[in-house]
Image (tube, helix red, strand yellow):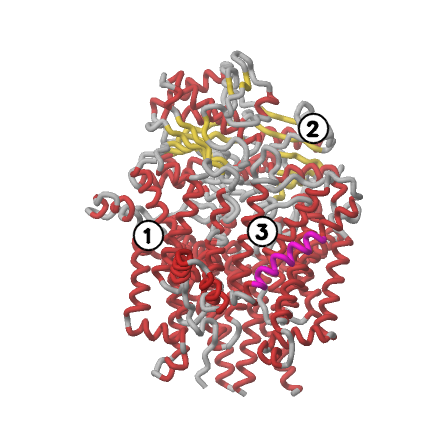
């Protein structure tokens, strides 16, 4: 009998040990939860806050994030945009859910619109859908909940002149003209590359990603030929797609391997187009191993901090201002269905209160190239438009004849990559 | 004898308490208030009609996979391949819909054919595991596991290849189907009474089948001692194979419902882990069909309720999984401890 | 692609295979002792998170690797305890642990999610690195990759060329016979489960502190690796050398998928990652059917050359699992 009890006690202890072994590190770590420094200080929400009832009529809005709120990328940029609103509108509060995407293991069997319902149940009157992956769900939710405001980040449903216009009175779609910043990134890459080979770490293939990869290429080509005076044919620009915005094992290609493969095969600058930081992390590793390479980050203004030395810069989204004005219209009742494709503030692209996109230079950019890049930025600000013909598509069909300036539709719905770029334009087959 | 029952209950309760204790410790470890967290899950699952509806939506496929594994478990088989069977069910359903969506057939017919295609797909995929097991001697755990990943690869191939959205190559899935081809739902919710009704019917049938029929008895005989059953004249391999087919059919049904009732398209990971979760439920109820429905409901409720945990306390929603896994693990170990304890007495 | 790029690429293959190798070698040892550790997928994730967390907190990569080993060992001991002492199904407990450790990793890993932490530095080996071809291929890696080369041969030597190794094979094949010869079967099984688990526990930190540095939760890209390792163990026929071949083959296929992305129209390259699974099924099939009568008959009916070829293929792919794999041993 006694032996049995001992066995049982041992059993219990063994289990507690296993679990506490897993748990112990966490206890010591808890304070480290803080989000990496951002210029928009995280106020309000203490970690254990329940929706406040003290402030009269707080405006609660919800945000569905495709990734983690501190992913150093797309999701963190949109999350910070929400924090900006929270900070500027006293009494407003943001609720959010992370890792919301089709088939996400975090929410088995629940679609984004159902998760939005959960946020509404907590008092949210406006919901941000932060990803193209939730595009259909955003529209579905907006139609099913006419009294809740919906903001579709990067969607085009409410673009009257777009291909997918669908009336949706309670919806606003917001995108920023990242094309310019990608051109700057491409220019920085072209100025820096020693081998003349630039890699583009692409997410999934759609109109948005084609347009951004192609913009980076246009910037690279311009600086390669016009600033450095080199031959266009000597520049290699290759796009490799992983299949989603970030790595999902077994379902996407592994971005770590894609980045490594670029660096190992003579590509000395990789422009990241995905939500996470593999291009930078692997560049740092390659550099430590004696391979002089650089990377350009994406999405989030402080993304270079992941690996400052090899970072040439980061083209980033600054959602705060657009989110703020739009949320305000929801509060004061002036909301109207609309589509925004917001421009940078060319007087200062890094003005966080006015510019929809920006470019922060990284420590890896040489002083000389930094000056050249500034000149390029000034040209863009002065009206240089690289989306001007002649531009051919990858299959050599003419897209823009000489001198023609692309319309917004031609840029947004770019059907292929451009001539001179390597990599798939459209998915296999 | 009576005393034994109390000891049994004691062990089970002890296991549950220990499981809760451990999860509570885990909550404390990450600095969350445990009681409030549990209440928040409860409230998130049952606090409003829309939450209960959400629970019911996820309950339905879980019931189907649980019903399926109850059959294979009875036959002494570990159908770990249900994820793949669900996936192939979803692929078949999508294929059928794609084939018929532009035809002049009435939507109801297309929907029914789609679901049936799912059933066939799931059964087909299960038959592969079954055939590997019965004719090739390949353990169903490894066969099933391997075929899960093959099914995933198949989905990826289809989603990025032949069935891709025009001009798009994304994990997000195929083009959503026209709304007329969706499984009808209660207005304003995503809950389909059809899917719920079918699932409940299936679990009832499985319960009756295993409990009162000769088929059920023989199936269990095969599961307990295949050689003895064979000597008693039970066609053992046929029974094993049939168990796989039936389980696969239920999994495929669940896959079809995911396509027609939830996502309205095919996407990678469409099985959502329901196959694995069904295995957990069946293990927790010690393979008793009677308890399967409420425990499956509990698991579904945990999944939904934990969303509130993230909204309110910023805790990762994987907590639902932790709680589910711990319950099953401790109950398994508790059962082992009980047997060891009883044997030594 | 010139020779050097090819070599550097292949060197990358060796590095990416290292974590899988640890998982596979660990599992091989465990299964040789007659125990199936089905928790591998959870072990990899939890040890990756735990290893990173410890390294992040202590700023010591070494402690991170140690933490990974401890986690792997503890998980394996739970399985050993439940199967050896409690006589419960190893498969059931292993499966639940696979899920439990995964969920725990995600839940407990939140505090270090997406933080930059320490990473094992590269360490070229002087002199050896200058050997043409081989230097670039093998000797410009990091410590854990060198250790991964070592562990293959260590495990192989231990299992097939030492007395304790003979005993190890004995307790997995015919525990009763080993018992009669004086082996404490269950104690040894505990021991080898722990050792195998600890080695498998290196897989996690090998990712989070080297190959895919950092912890990114469900975006880490590690969920599924353990199942792949499990299938490679079987493909490897419980022989460390062949298992290593399997792990390298897997990493090579992943790399080829990338290199060939533009040259394989119509095939999404991530589909190639699935290759270990059909190979596993084929191996298991051959284990069981290569002696079957109908196979002999088909072979006999074949013309001479294809038959020779087939028989050779069958022989190479054949493997025999430890006879008492997953069977509990009771000395009474």
Foreground pick, A348 / C245? C245
Q: Estimate how packed mark 3 is, as few (under 14), some (14 to 19) or many (20 or more) residues with alpha carbons within 10 Å.
A: some
| Residue C284 picture location, percent across and down | 47, 63
Residue B231 seen by the camera: yes
Q: Estimate how packed mark 2 is, as few (under 14), some (14 to 19) or many (20 or more) residues with alpha carbons within 10 Å.
A: few
Q: In the drawing, what numbered circle is on residue C10?
A: none
**Residue pictured at 32% horizontal, 52% vertical:** C145
Labels 3 and 1 positioned on one and the same chain: no
Residue C201 seen by the camera: no
Distance in Å between CA atoms under marks 1 and 2: 54 Å
Residue at label 1?
C145
In which image quadrant can residue B276 be found? bottom right
Residue at label 3?
A105
In front of the other: label 3 or label 1?
1
**Residue pictured at 65% horizontal, 39% vertical:** B175
| Residue B28 picture location, percent across and down | 54, 60
| Mark 3 / mark 2, whichever is N-terminal | 3
Whether label 1 touches label 2, CB < 8 Å: no
| Residue C136 picture location, percent across and down | 27, 44
Q: Estimate how packed mark 1 is, as few (under 14), some (14 to 19) or many (20 or more) residues with alpha carbons within 10 Å.
A: many
Q: Chain of mark 1?
A: C
- Region in magenta: B116-131
**Regarding mark 1 in the picture, which secondary structure is present there?**
helix
**Residue pictured at 37% horizontal, 33% vertical:** A267
**Residue pictured at 56% horizontal, 40% vertical:** B160
Quarter that holds the N terminus of chain B: bottom right
Residue at label 2?
A165
């Amino acid at each position: 009998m006694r032996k049995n009890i001992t066995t049982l006690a041992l059993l219990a202890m063994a289990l507690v040990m296993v679990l506490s072994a897993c748990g112990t590190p966490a206890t010591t770590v808890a304070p480290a939860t803080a989000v990496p420094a951002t210029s928009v200080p995280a106020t309000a929400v203490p970690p254990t806050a329940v929706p406040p009832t003290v402030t009269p009529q707080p405006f609660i809005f919800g945000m569905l994030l495709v990734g983690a709120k501190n992913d150093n990328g797309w999701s963190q940029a949109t999350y910070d945009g929400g924090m900006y609103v929270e900070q500027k509108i006293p009494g407003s509060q943001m609720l959010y859910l992370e890792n919301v995407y089709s088939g996400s293991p975090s929410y088995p069997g629940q679609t984004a619109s159902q998760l939005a319902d959960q946020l509404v149940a907590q008092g949210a009157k406006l919901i941000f859908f932060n990803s193209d992956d939730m595009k259909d769900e955003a529209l579905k939710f907006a139609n099913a909940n006419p009294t809740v405001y919906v903001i579709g980040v990067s969607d085009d449903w409410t673009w009257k002149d777009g291909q997918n216009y669908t009336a949706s009175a309670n919806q606003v779609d917001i995108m920023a003209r990242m094309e310019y910043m990608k051109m700057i990134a491409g220019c920085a890459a072209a100025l820096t590359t020693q081998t003349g080979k630039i890699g583009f770490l692409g997410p999934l293939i759609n109109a948005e990603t084609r347009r951004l990869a192609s913009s980076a290429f246009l910037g690279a080509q311009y600086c390669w030929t016009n600033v450095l005076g080199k031959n266009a044919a000597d520049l290699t620009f290759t796009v490799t797609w992983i299949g989603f915005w970030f790595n999902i094992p077994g379902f996407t290609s592994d971005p770590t391997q894609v980045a490594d493969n670029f660096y190992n095969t003579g590509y000395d600058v990789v422009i990241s187009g995905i939500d996470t930081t593999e291009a930078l992390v692997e560049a740092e590793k390659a550099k430590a191993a004696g391979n002089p390479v650089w990377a350009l980050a994406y999405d989030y203004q402080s993304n270079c901090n992941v690996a400052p030395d090899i970072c040439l810069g980061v083209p980033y989204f600054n959602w705060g201002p657009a989110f703020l004005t739009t949320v305000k219209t929801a509060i004061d009742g002036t909301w109207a269905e609309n589509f925004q494709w917001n421009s940078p503030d060319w007087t200062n692209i890094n003005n966080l209160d006015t510019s929809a996109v920006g470019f922060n230079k990284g420590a890896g950019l040489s002083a000389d190239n930094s000056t050249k890049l500034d000149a390029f930025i000034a040209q863009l600000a002065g009206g240089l438009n690289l989306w001007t013909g002649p531009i051919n598509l990858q299959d050599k069909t003419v897209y823009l004849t000489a001198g023609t300036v692309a319309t917004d539709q031609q840029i947004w719905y770019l059907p292929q990559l451009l001539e001179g770029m390597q990599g798939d334009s459209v998915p296999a087959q | 004898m009576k005393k034994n029952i109390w000891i049994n209950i004691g062990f089970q309760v002890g296991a549950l308490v220990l499981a809760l204790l451990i999860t509570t410790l885990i909550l404390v470890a990450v600095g969350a208030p445990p009681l409030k967290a549990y209440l928040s899950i409860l409230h998130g699952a049952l606090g409003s009609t829309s939450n209960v509806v959400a629970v019911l939506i996820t309950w339905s496929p879980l019931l189907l996979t649980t019903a399926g594994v109850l059959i294979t478990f009875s036959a002494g088989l570990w159908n770990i391949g249900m994820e793949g069977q669900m996936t192939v069910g979803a692929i078949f359903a999508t294929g059928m819909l794609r084939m018929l969506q532009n035809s002049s057939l009435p939507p109801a017919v297309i929907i029914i054919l789609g679901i049936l295609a799912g059933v066939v797909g799931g059964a087909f995929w299960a038959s592969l595991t079954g055939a590997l097991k019965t004719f090739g001697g390949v353990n169903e755990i490894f066969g099933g596991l391997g075929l899960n990943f093959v099914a995933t690869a198949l989905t990826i191939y289809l989603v990025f290849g032949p069935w891709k959205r025009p001009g798009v190559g994304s994990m997000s899935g195929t083009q959503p189907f026209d709304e007329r081809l969706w499984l009808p739902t209660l207005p304003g919710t995503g809950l389909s009474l059809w899917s719920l009704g079918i699932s409940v019917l299936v679990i009832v049938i499985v319960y009756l089948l295993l409990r009162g029929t000769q088929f059920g008895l023989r199936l269990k005989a095969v599961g307990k001692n295949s050689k003895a059953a064979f000597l008693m004249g039970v066609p053992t391999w046929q029974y094993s194979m049939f168990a796989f087919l039936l389980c696969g059919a239920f999994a495929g049904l669940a896959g079809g419902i995911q396509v027609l009732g939830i996502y309205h398209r095919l996407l990678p990971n469409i099985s959502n882990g329901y196959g694995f979760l069904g295995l957990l439920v069946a293990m927790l109820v010690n393979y008793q069909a009677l308890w399967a429905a409420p425990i499956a409901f509990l698991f579904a409720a945990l999944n939904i309720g934990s969303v509130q945990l993230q909204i309110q306390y910023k805790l990762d929603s994987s907590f639902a999984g932790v709680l589910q896994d711990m319950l099953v693990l401790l109950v398994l170990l508790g059962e082992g401890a009980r047997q060891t304890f009883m044997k030594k007495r | 692609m010139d020779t050097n790029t090819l070599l550097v690429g292949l060197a990358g293959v060796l590095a990416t295979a290292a974590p899988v190798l640890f998982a596979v070698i660990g599992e091989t040892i465990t299964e040789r002792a007659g125990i199936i550790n089905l928790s591998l997928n959870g072990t990899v994730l939890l040890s990756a998170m735990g290893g990173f967390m410890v390294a992040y907190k202590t700023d010591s990569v070494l402690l991170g690797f140690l933490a990974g080993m401890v986690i792997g060992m503890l998980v394996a001991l739970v399985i050993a305890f439940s199967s050896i002492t409690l006589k419960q199904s190893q498969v059931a407990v292993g499966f639940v642990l696979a899920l439990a450790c995964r969920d725990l990793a995600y839940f407990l890993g939140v505090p270090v999610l997406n933080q930059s932490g320490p990473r094992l530095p590269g360490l070229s080996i002087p002199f050896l690195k200058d050997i043409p071809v081989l230097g670039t291929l093998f000797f410009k890696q990091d410590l854990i990759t060198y250790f991964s080369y070592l562990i293959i041969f260590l495990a192989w030597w231990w299992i097939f060329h030492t007395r304790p190794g003979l005993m190890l094979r004995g307790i997995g094949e015919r525990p009763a016979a080993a018992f009669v010869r004086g082996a404490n079967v269950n104690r040894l099984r505990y021991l080898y489960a722990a050792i195998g688990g600890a080695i498998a526990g290196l897989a996690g930190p090998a990712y989070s502190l080297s190959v895919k540095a950092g912890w990114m939760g469900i975006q880490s890209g590690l969920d599924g690796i353990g199942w792949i390792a499990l299938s490679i163990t079987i493909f490897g026929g419980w022989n460390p050398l062949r298992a290593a071949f399997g792990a390298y083959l897997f990493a090579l296929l992943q790399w080829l998928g990338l290199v060939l992305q533009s040259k394989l129209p119509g095939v999404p390259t991530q589909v190639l990652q699935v290759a270990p699974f059909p190979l596993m099924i084929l191996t298991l099939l051959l284990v069981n059917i290569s002696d079957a009568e109908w196979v002999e008959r088909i072979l006999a009916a074949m013309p001479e050359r294809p038959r020779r070829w087939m028989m050779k293929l069958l022989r190479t792919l054949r493997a025999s699992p430890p006879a008492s794999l997953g069977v509990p041993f009771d000395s009474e």
